[in-house]
Amino acid sequence: MTPEEITAREQIVIAGAALTARGLAHGTAGNISIRLDDGILVTPTNSSLGTLDAARLTKLDFNGTYVSGDLPSKEGFMHLASYQRRPQDSAVVHLHCSHSVAVSSLADIDADNPIPPITPYFVMRVGKVQMLPYFRPGDRALADAIASVDPARHAVLLANHGPVVSGHSLNNSIAAIEELEETAKLFLLLGGRAVRTLNADQLADLAHHFPS
């Protein structure tokens, strides 16, 4: 096992415990992965993110073939599709955090912009989110749907399910998914009232000073 893989395993365990402690992960919901040179590490099926064992994390090759560890999450293919869509990213986090799932369950939500640019930090850390239609958990068709999303977007919201966020690092992915969840909470707190979102000039100014 390479030093890179040992470090990645430790990072996933620490991240899982932190997300659980912050109330963003519950039960056995959600999964985390990190890309390696020869495949990906992903949290196993039916595992609690709060009590992960580094030695039992699942390893898959880039074709999705099982290599080692416990049985893979049924959503491991979703992580692989995310890496194929955004080859510059090295980590993916998928959670069932309450406010994001609540937004993803609203009727008549704008799939191209389900969470509006309420704050500059949402724009800087998350950007524009794409919401995909509902897929049964484990449905392989979800991989094709993720592959179809504009690669410029690193955050995807699955209808009635939750967010999937990729990033250049695991810390980057976690920061983005936390910001997404907090903005979803703000959006719900506003309760359908008229919202003063950032305008085009303000968005352009952020893009100029904080390029992704």
Image (cartoon, rainbow, N blue to C red):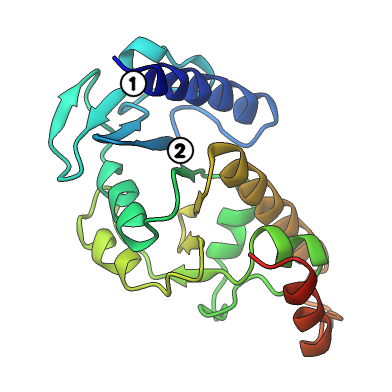
Discs 1, 2 touching: Cβ within 8 Å: no
Quarter of the picture containing the N terminus is: top left
Can you tell which mark lies on residue 57? 1
Residue 40 or residue 128, whichever sits in front:
40
**Label 2, on which residue?**
30
Q: Amino acid at mark 2?
A: Gly
Measuring from the top left, give residue 83's x and y in whole percent: 35, 53
Could you say whether the residue bearing mark 1 is in a helix, strand or loop? loop
Q: Is residue 193 left or right of residue 84?
A: right
User: Which label's residue is closer to the chain start, 1 or 2?
Assistant: 2
Q: Residue at x 26, y 59 (%)?
A: 143
Q: Is residue 90 left or right of residue 99?
A: left
Q: Residue at x 48, y 62 (%)?
A: 156
Residue 142 or residue 154, whichever sits in front:
154
How many neighbours does mark 1 have within 10 angstroms: few (below 14), some (14-19), or many (20 or more)?
Answer: many
Q: Residue at x 60, y 72 (%)?
A: 128
Q: Residue at x 53, y 64 (%)?
A: 105
Report which quarter residue 75 is drawn in: top left
Vertical position of residue 133 compared to residue 65: above or below: below
Measuring from the top left, give residue 103's x and y in whole percent: 61, 63
Task: Give the mark toward the camera: 1 or 2.
Answer: 1
Measuring from the top left, give residue 39's x and y in whole percent: 25, 36
Distance Cα–Cα, label 1 vs label 2:
14 Å
Can you tell which mark lies on residue 73? none
Q: Amino acid at mark 1?
A: Leu
Q: Is residue 112 left or right of residue 205?
A: left
